Amino acid sequence: MSFLSGLSMSGGYGGADILRGCDISVDKGEIAVIVGPNGAGKSTAMKALLGMLHLREGTVTLDGKDITQMSPQDRVKEGMAMVPQTNNVFVSMTVQENLEMGAFLRRDDIYRTMDLVFELFPILKDKRDQPAGELSGGQRQQVAVGRALMTGPQVLLLDEPTAGVSPIVMDELFDRILEVKQTGIAILMVEQNARQALNIADTGYVLVTGENKFTDTGEALLADPEVRRAFLGG
Amino acid sequence: MHSWGGRAVLTDVFDALILLSNFVIIPVLTYGSQLALGALGITLIYGILRFANFAHGDLMAFGTMVTVLMTWWLQSIGVGLGPLPTALLALPVAIAITIVMVLFIDKSVFKFYRRKRSAPALFVIASIGVMFVLNGIVRFIIGPNDQRFSDGERFIIKARAFKQMTGLNEGLAIKVSQGLTISIAFLLVVALFWFLQRTRTGKAMRAYSDNEDLALLSGINPERVVMVTWIITATLATIAGTLYGLDKSFKPFTYFQLLLPLFAAAIVGGIGNPLGAILGGYVVAFSEVSITYAYKKFLKYLVPENWEPDGLVQFLSTDYKFAVSFIILVLVLLIRPTGILRGRVI
């Protein structure tokens, strides 16, 4: 069984189900990417894994433990970290304070982790005393990922980390995410830029209307003519 | 101005400045500090619990009432602080009781709406209910009348002594209550900012105020943040109310009326922004005092003898001082709803 997995998840926000029996899982040292058309339930699937959505059916397990009934806060304590798509930094606080807040629950030495974050995103070290709200979009995303890494997570959930950043910044961000993967963290990502995301993915999930349409390695999905035609624009 | 001799002109200018200091500058600093401490409570509650707390004026009244009762008791057993008011000795107990009171109110009223994730308007209306209840409790216990509870020395510098010392016509007077208010407010503000900027809990409060969802994702416990916020608010409210009472007198209705300048201060500075609340406190105090002060005597020192104004040179009668806060409030909401230092938009 995978490190984090959601099996046959069904549910929505009241009303009709958005997720309809979808399976998502990711292992340590692996990148899984969820792609699909708008309204397919990509972000919803990720929220379900973090417990921000009540599941009508299905189970979520982390390291073999059933966490389906756990609150999001408790899942964070269990080692899950999430970078939301928007409003993902504390705009009025400095870069360093943002990182400190990520480590809020930790009682051990957080400055080693902070040095690692600064190594990963050197620009943040220069801007550590600047309010995060004054940074550019790409730099903010780095702060957001840095804050999540400060929790010392075993699983990192990224909701469209490259939304609204330039292609150059996007490539760089993906490179950094690959580096994070090397440290043995499980990474699950929802992405609009499907082609680039599948390029770095070990596993890709194509969701359509809340169901798994295709699941394969990133490479295989990129090579699949049907996936290319329907979701990657040829 | 009584002569054109150089020395006389200089003393006239000094006299005018001392007059201004006695009736405008020092009162503004004092009243402004009291408003700042009160507005800080309003702004903290707005930033963290996200509603305008209408019960804040009556919370100040409640805290002050406890101080007054404690002071009377201490006086009756003959305990005092010599030149300083006995109320300072009573203050820690009053703060503790007020903290217990707000935590009880939060648990019995606001927590219910928090759990239901109610709209801010519902919180505001609930706070109006709390306001009436607190108001009733205070009047029931201590009555609606004016209560004096200041004792000890009255003045730090007396006008007569100052006149004798300097030979000027006007004497500088600074009351103990004024000196206490300004210095205590300064110390409290420094302590509060140190807490918010440097401590783990303070930073968690700022994070929660900035972005609630992200604070939750960082593992910050919202109930703890809320509790600490109420504790700080109750402390500030009790101290602000007591200082105001020492400076003037304690009358429950006056504290209810303070709500208007307090909200004006919080909003002018930028609600949700603690620095703004302090700035706003002084802006409102300065506007109120400077517009209702009669400048006749002040001008008399500065203009040639036969140019003396006939009227009082008072822009508004002191009866209208609340109109000043109200006008400031309306103007800010119309022109710059985020306030001077960019708080949130109401």
Image (tube, coloured by chain):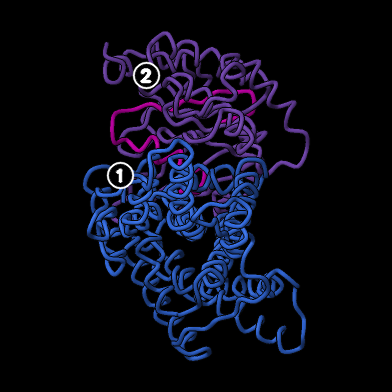
Chain colours: A purple, B blue
**Whole-number angstrom distance, CA of label 2 to CA of label 1:** 79 Å
**Does A50 lie within the magenta span?**
yes
A175 above or below B229? Answer: above
Residue at image point 45% right, 68% down: B56
Picture coordinates of residue A12, whole percent (x, y): 36, 50
The residue at 31%/60% (across/down) is B292
Residue B301: horizontal and vertical position, in percent?
38, 49
**Residue in the foreground of this view, choosing between A129 and B262:** B262
Q: Residues within 10 Å of mark 1 (few under 14, many from 20)?
A: few
Q: Select label 2 or label 1 by which is in front.
A: 1
Residue B307 relative to residue A31: left or right: left
Secondary structure state at the residue bearing disc 1: loop
Q: Are marks 2 and 1 on the same chain?
A: no
Badge 2: how crowded within 10 Å, few (<14), some, or many (20+)? some
- In the image, what residue type sits under mark 2? Asn
Label 2: which secondary element: loop
Judge left or right: residue B10 versus residue A36.
Answer: right
Question: Which disc number belongs to residue B304?
Answer: 1
Could you say where residue B297 lies in the image, as x and y percent from the top left?
Answer: 35, 56
Please tell me the numbered disc located at residue A193.
Answer: 2
The chain letter under disc 2 is A
Residue at figure coordinates x 34%, y 51% from the top left: B300
Find the magenta span and give its range: A26-55
Q: Is residue A8 visible?
A: no
Q: Amino acid at mark 1?
A: Pro
The numbered dot on residue B7 is none
A222 falls in the magenta region = no
